[in-house]
């Protein structure tokens, strides 16, 4: 018989209710699970002597992590209920865009044969340029672009702050606009860095041939594009242009 644990006493005994609403008491020796029984857990059990006996957790097995997960308990949890509620609200759009912004910071942003960076590690580009400039006896700095690199961290910080405000139910007003501008700035930095490197090479004695080779070899990666996309979505959501279609359906 299938049921759900209503409550558990300190000694491990408790009460189970089945799908028909009948209640059955059990003792600590009737539990067959590896972990202590918990209220709300789905169980399989036998009925003997008007009580629940041979009680096992109702498992939806997920292998690969060496553990089993009770999916019924997860679906009925407060966190799952909160996620379902948010998915039907307009806040779902800036919430998803914020998650994409954070993910984008750990994806490739700028790459070359001897260089690969994410938005998180983008500051190693000007360090590499400065080292190369010192070896070749020139200025390897990236000027204003290099000095503004630290501002890229405003994007994930704004995104995380917005997620916190949405999840905790705080009013977030125009924060998506701020998060969107920060994300677009961060996503644009790899393009600006690539342009600054090419301009520096063209202005040096290496000429257009060298700059053309660098242009062909240096690629702006998925992280930059994803950050730009997430920023545009944040701004569109903040302006009310981009809305959650599921919220519109649920309100009808």
Image: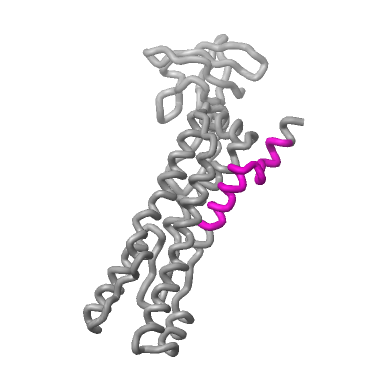
Residue 199 on image: x %, y %: 41, 78
Residue 26 on image: x %, y %: 48, 14
Is 121 within the magenta?
no
Residue 216 on image: x %, y %: 48, 81
Query: Quarter of the image containing the N terminus?
Result: top right
State the residue at coordinates (46%, 51%): 182
Is 246 within the magenta?
yes
Residue 183 on image: x %, y %: 48, 53
Query: Quarter of the image containing the C terminus?
Result: top right
Q: Residue 9 vs residue 166: left or right? A: left
Q: Which stretch appears magenta?
A: 227-248
Q: Which quadrant would residue 143 be assigned to in this image?
A: bottom left
Q: Which residue is at the front of the view, 206 or 8?
A: 206
Q: Which quadrant would residue 135 be assigned to in this image?
A: bottom left
Residue farthest to the right, as pictured: 252
Above or below, comparing residue 55 to residue 159 in the picture? above
Q: Which residue is at the front of the view, 247 or 138?
A: 138
State the residue at coordinates (53%, 39%): 174
Q: Residue 169 vs residue 151: left or right? A: right
Above or below, comparing residue 66 to residue 109 in the picture? above
State the residue at coordinates (47%, 68%): 191
């Amino acid at each position: 018989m299938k049921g759900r644990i209503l409550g558990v006493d300190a000694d491990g005994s408790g009460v189970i209710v089945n799908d028909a609403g009948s209640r059955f008491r059990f003792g600590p020796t009737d539990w067959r699970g590896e972990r202590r029984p918990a209220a709300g857990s789905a169980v399989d059990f036998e009925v003997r002597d008007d009580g629940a006996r041979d009680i096992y957790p109702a498992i939806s097995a997920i292998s690969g992590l060496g553990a089993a997960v009770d999916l019924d308990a997860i679906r009925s949890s407060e966190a799952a209920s909160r996620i379902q509620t948010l998915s039907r609200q307009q806040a779902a759009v800036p919430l998803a865009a914020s998650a994409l912004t954070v993910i984008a910071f750990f994806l490739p942003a700028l790459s070359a044969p001897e260089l690969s960076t994410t938005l998180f590690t983008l500051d190693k580009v000007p360090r590499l340029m400065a080292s190369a400039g010192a070896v070749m006896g020139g200025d390897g700095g990236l000027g204003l672009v290099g000095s503004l690199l630290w501002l890229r961290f405003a994007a994930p910080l704004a995104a995380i702050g917005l997620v916190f405000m949405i999840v905790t139910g705080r009013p977030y007003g125009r924060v998506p606009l701020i998060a969107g501008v920060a994300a677009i700035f961060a996503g644009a930095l790899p393009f600006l860095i690539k342009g600054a490197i090419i301009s520096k090479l063209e202005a040096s004695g290496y000429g257009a041939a060298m700059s053309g080779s660098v242009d062909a070899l240096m690629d702006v990666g998925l992280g930059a594009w994803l950050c730009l996309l997430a920023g545009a979505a944040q701004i569109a959501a903040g302006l009310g242009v981009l809305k959650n279609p599921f919220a519109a359906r649920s309100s009808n």
